Image (spheres, grey):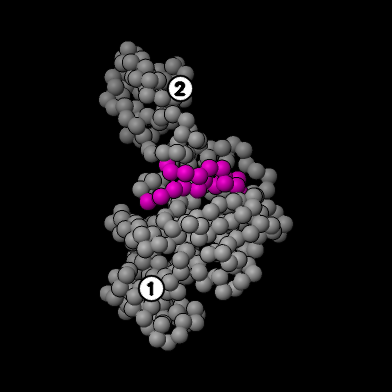
Amino acid sequence: MTVLSADGVHAGYRGRPVLRDVTVDLGPGVHVLLGPNGAGKTTLFRVLAGVLRPTSGRVLIAGRDPHHDPGAKRLISVTAHRAALSPQLTVADNLGYWARVLDLPGPLRTRRLTEVSDALQLHDLAGRAAGTLSRGQTQRVALAKALLCDPPVLLLDEPTTGMDPTATADLRERLRHLATDGRTILASTHNMDEAQTLADDVVVLSDGGVVARGTPAELREEMLGHGLRLRVRARLDPTGVLRGLGHEPVPSGDGAVLVEVGDESESETLIEQLVRSGVGLREVAHAGNTLEDIFLRLDKRTHEEPPAYRTWEQR
């Protein structure tokens, strides 16, 4: 079931294009928007939320166009990279203020404030100034703010940036619960481990266009083939030997290097060659994860082939 869709969307700033022919349909679940800086992720969020009007194409939220039907904007909430909270006000006052901005009627306002505080476990934070909260606590309050109008669609722009592992795991659990309840969640992130764990599917954005979509396993097959990235540690520096074998190793820290191979068979061959070379292998293991491999490939391509239309307003 499609809840949020973009059909042939083009958008930009001051006549300069950022998004080009973006078409995507999203239903209930957690969808991750993956792409390097400059891909247009934040611009796409603005278009989907009805903030930035596309130059062509159409956005629909539950069948309604937020750019022509202002009431449709109530069906979607956005949590930006930086939470829109007043640091001097308490958590309770911040949420109360936004409930009034949303023009929630008195009885409904009281009920929703209680419900989101219960859901995000905010009662212990209610009397604290927002400016004194940790990153994880701030994100919980920002998510509560986004849920005040009980929207079917949530857009989360890098929600886990700066959070510690415990807070990240807590937020992941809450997002999964919201998705199970039937909400459509689109989240951008640079945390590849988090993305791979959280995503029902992944939309890959590069140079302003959707270049792939699918599960992490499907994307590896489509974008990387059967290639693998290995982490190699040895008693002696293996860089020279690896280059002599036709590989270009990348330092990884702790004396290890990363090297690309075509498949498991090539991996086994490389190990045999390194053993024969006498470098003294200590470790050969798969490195990173599927989404990290894809991200690094996209980021490398972005820096090698910067599009002429990229502007400072793209992220």
Q: Residue furthest right?
A: 15
On residue 194, the disc is none
Q: Residue at x 68, y 52 (%)?
A: 17
**Residue type for callout 2:** His
Q: Height in image: 251 above or below 81?
A: above
Residue picked out by circle 1:
130
**Residue type for callout 1:** Ala
Q: Residue at x 46, y 82 (%)?
A: 104
Q: Residues within 10 Å of mark 1 (few under 14, many from 20)?
A: many
Q: Residues within 10 Å of mark 2 (few under 14, many from 20)?
A: some
Q: Nearer the viewer, residue 25 or 268?
A: 25
Task: Report x, y in % for residue 147.
Answer: 42, 70
Is residue 135 in the magenta section?
no
Is residue 210 in the magenta section?
yes
Q: CB under 8 Å between callouts 2 and 1? A: no
Q: Secondary structure at mark 1?
A: helix
Q: Nearer the viewer, residue 26 or 191?
A: 26
Residue picked out by circle 2:
247
Circle nearer the N terminus (2, 1): 1
Task: Report x, y in % for residue 133.
Answer: 35, 69
Q: Which residues are magenta?
A: 198-216
